[in-house]
Image: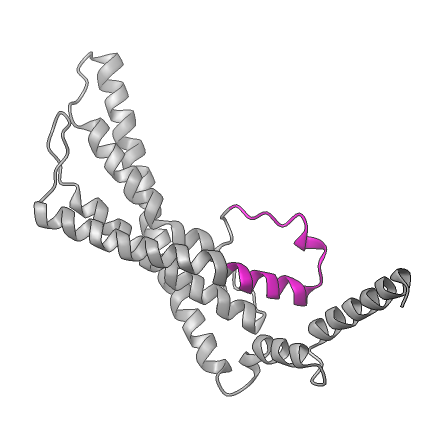
Amino acid sequence: MHKGTTVAVGARLGRSVCTDLEAGRPDHPMGAHVARMLHAGEGKHGSYMHSVIRVIDALNEFVGRIVAVVAIVFASIIIYDVILRYAFNEPTRWAFDVSKQFFGFYFVMLGGYALRHKAHVRVDIVTENFSRGWQRIIDLLGYAVFYFPFTYMFTVLSWDFAMTSLGQREVTYGAIQMPVYPLKISMAVAAGLLLLQGICEVLKIILDVDTTSEEAI
């Protein structure tokens, strides 16, 4: 067989496989497998999966709205310290350390909320031109290969980190001694929330639903 003929046959076969994968044709083994995966929510487990999505979304929504108030707190502390420093020449000894702790808490605890609202950086220059079926497959692979290994390690290591800090009653070494272990415990909690929201996002991909808005599913 000539080289050109081989390339042409390979190209036609590749297009055929891609078409079968997107359509989930039952007469193609790979297509059937993808179809079962992407349409799993249409069976008896669909209602249960929707319930799990609602619960996890509601949890991170609640946490995000509560933690958002912390931004007002540490911003107020910074403004208070600036006024004392430049208007009265009497800067506080505690404002910097306290505001830093509050900001750290604010930053880590909003990870799950940000993922729920698709606020994390996403590079989709290539995939935005793909069909919806291929976008879902690529998203699932991304979660399986990159996201879950990272969040699992983040959760486990953060928990060990927090328990060590709690056991030592760790404090800061600044102008005032503040306990550090509450912030490190919040890191472990935030990692767990991020892991849960990742599970929720995978279920959304499988069911092909979008709950970015605040409306219930």
Q: Answer with left or right where residue 10 lies relative to residue 208.
A: right
Q: How is the image coloured?
A: one colour
Q: Residue at x 41, y 73 (%)?
A: 52
Can residue 67 be seen from the camera position used here?
A: yes
Q: Quadrant of the N terminus?
A: bottom right
Q: Is residue 98 above or below residue 23?
A: above
Q: Answer with left or right where residue 4 lies relative to residue 36.
A: right
Q: Residue at x 16, y 53 (%)?
A: 163
- Residue farthest to the front, as pictured: 1
Magenta-drawn stretch contains 138: yes
Q: Residue at x 25, y 33 (%)?
A: 99
Q: Residue at x 66, y 81 (%)?
A: 29
Q: How many marks overall?
A: 0
Q: Answer with left or right where residue 197 lies relative to residue 142.
A: left
Q: Is residue 79 above or below residue 131?
A: above
Q: Answer with left or right where residue 25 lies relative to residue 67.
A: right
Residues drawn in magenta: 121-142
The residue lying toward the viewer, choosing from 179 and 162, is 162
- Give the x, y percent position of residue 105: 28, 44
The residue lying toward the viewer, choosing from 205 and 84, is 205
- Give the x, y percent position of residue 200: 45, 66
The answer to which quarter of the image holds residue 74 is top left
- Give the x, y percent position of residue 165: 15, 46
